[in-house]
Image (spheres, rainbow, N blue to C red):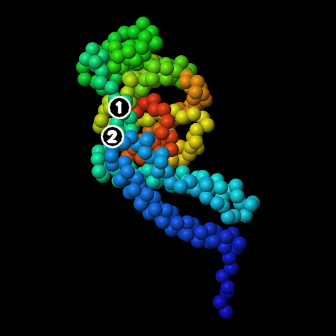
Amino acid sequence: MTEFVTYSPEEIINSNLLSTASRFDAVCEQELSHLSELAHEIAQTLEDGAPFSEILPDHTPLALTNAPLSVLDQNLPAVRSARELHSTWQKAWLCMDLYRRLAKKRPFSASLFFSDTETPSSNAYNRIAYQRSSYADSAYLKFAKLLPLPRLSYAHSFVSACEDVYNGLCEFCILPLENTTEGVLSTFFRLIEQYDLKIAATCDISSTDAGRTSRFALLRRSLTPTLDPQQKSLYFSFCIPQRSEPGLSELMLVAKLYGIEVTRVDSFFAHREEIGPSIRLTVLTDSVRLYAFLLYLSMELPHAYPIGLYLHLPHGDRE
């Protein structure tokens, strides 16, 4: 007589979970199809060239969190949190599909999101202001390689270097951002915020004995164009209020869904009083993922404050 095959309770439960997962996969594919149809409709709306941040907030998918729940009371917290996560998932893949559709019709560039490009005067063009030091001199030599016919202008203080850019006397200035001794240099980030400067490039400068490394930023008034159009990977830094919706956890989830590397998260108190406690987030990614991420920000956080779209130069010793 053939022996009966016996199963443990755990094996039966795991089999049931696998069956449920298979059904969930089919539902996900159905949702992706619906999201693709929605992306098609939104893409037609965006063809008139209006800024993404003005149109996309009106086309966000119906929030799952607002739909009625028909579950046992004991399961409400778990199901509600699953809906919140799934709503972020929907919006992320909607924006990815939207990017792919739009990119087929026109070339994509960061200028589609940031229209703050300024043409410097002939006197300011490629002129870099900074307070002189051996470290800053080395940073200047690195940054100068990114520009045709760079020119330097020594400033008597960090503030005056920022003022020269703000007043249009120089196109760029150089400030330190952090070092291995003190960490983030908050004073200089406050200057960046105060003078509304944007990071165009960064580099690391080490002391002769490699005992200390400082990171410097090349700054200007506008985010675009990027200094190296051939650069495949770029850093993008932006700020949001600590209590914004969606918040940091949703942004981290979207970055994970896109395969974007989050390189830094800092909390600080914004110089602008109406904003207050804020978060500065920096990501590293390629153009495809970056543009999808920017579409997501345009839809969900159109007032996110960008502070840099930049490349990081390879590490090297002082020159």
Say above or below: 254 vs 278: below
**Mark 1 residue type:** Thr
Tell me if I can see residue 314 in this picture: no
Q: Is residue 252 left or right of residue 40?
A: right
Q: Which mark is residue 197?
A: none
Q: Amino acid at mark 2?
A: Ser
Q: Which residue is mark 1?
A: 224
Q: Is residue 238 above or below residue 45?
A: above
Of 238 and 60, the residue lying toward us = 60
Give the vertical position of 269 relative to 27 (above or below): above
- Residue linked to disc 2: 109
Q: Position of residue 237 (x, y in %)?
A: 47, 33
Identify which residue, 207 or 55, lies in the foreground: 55
Using residue 286 as the reference point, say whether residue 244 is left or right of it. Answer: right
Residue at far top of view: 156
Q: Quadrant of the N terminus?
A: bottom right
Q: Position of residue 270 (x, y in %)?
A: 56, 25
The answer to the question of whether label 2 and label 1 lie on touching residues, with beta carbons closer than 8 A, is yes
- Residue 37 image position (x, y, % from top left): 41, 60
Residue at 33% x, 48% y is: 47
